[in-house]
Amino acid sequence: DQQVKQNSPSLSVQEGRISILNCDYTNSMFDYFLWYKKYPAEGPTFLISISSIKDKNEDGRFTVFLNKSAKHLSLHIVPSQPGDSAVYFCAASAGSSNTGKLIFGQGTTLQVKP
Amino acid sequence: KAGVTQTPRYLIKTRGQQVTLSCSPISGHRSVSWYQQTPGQGLQFLFEYFSETQRNKGNFPGRFSGRQFSNSRSEMNVSTLELGDSALYLCASSPLRGGSHGELFFGEGSRLTVL
């Protein structure tokens, strides 16, 4: 049973446009959500996170939106840059005693074309 | 500040052998988690250690084990290797027992190939 799902394996956008990556989850106990970026041959790098008590968090070009009723979150990248091309994972955790235990989605490969 | 260091970076084993992977967390980080990444299953949680104690465990068979030392360094061991154990094994550290809002800092991983 996959508790965190990223239904789009890949996404291609033009440089300067908006990239929207989506993630759905099934476990209502999740209370913290994160996005990680991964380049080949490197470990995942933390991007941005959001607590379940919020519906939006913004950090520079990156904004994460959380819709708890729909159990859906999305990552917006504006404007997209070629250096953003990577695999993006959403992840979730449930409870303060489980913050080291992240449940990851399968990842979405983003390609930003110059 | 040095990042999470994992050794070895690459290794090849044959079925039935065992393997030990090592992880040195960021200085001051006391929590270490391990993940397995495969093309089919994505990133899956193996276990988490804090202060030399296993805090959480994922759904992996008993062939997968780990430990943490007093200096927070961690090792994981896989015994009786199977072909399906071929994967990238990632170690992540965080500064607090509860994590820093779940922000884990990952190493570059150990790529294990089982022949």
Image (cartoon, coloured by chain):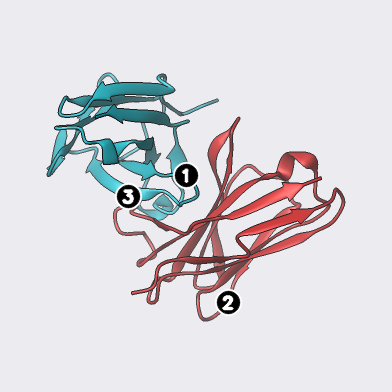
* Mark 3 crowdedness (10 Å alpha carbons): few <14, some 14-19, many ≥20: some
Q: Secondary structure at mark 3?
A: strand
**Can you identify the residue that label 2 sits on?**
B69
Residue ID at (39%, 73%): B2
Q: CA–CA distance between discs 1 and 2?
A: 30 Å
Label 1 amino acid?
Pro
Question: In the image, is residue B57 above or below residue A83?
Answer: below
Disc 3 residue type (three-letter): Phe
Q: x%, y% of residue A24?
A: 36, 24
Q: Find the distance from the CA under tag 3 to the CA under tag 2.
A: 26 Å
Is the residue A17 above or below the residue A34 in the image? above
Q: Are marks 1 and 2 on the same chain?
A: no
Q: Secondary structure at mark 2?
A: loop
**In the rendering, which numbered label is found on residue A40?**
1
Q: Nearer the viewer, residue B106 or B33?
A: B106
Q: Is residue A14 visible?
A: yes
Residue A114 drawn at (x, y percent): 24, 29
Q: Which chain is cyan?
A: A
Disc 1: host chain: A
| Left or right side of B106 for B9 | right
Judging by the rendered image, the residue that carries numbered circle 3 is A46
Q: Is residue A114 left or right of residue A93?
A: left
The disc, 1 or 3, on the residue closer to the chain's N-terminal end is 1
Give the position of the N terminus of chain A as an image quadrant: top right
Image coords of residue A56 (percent x, y): 14, 35
The vertical placement of A52 against B24, above or below, is above
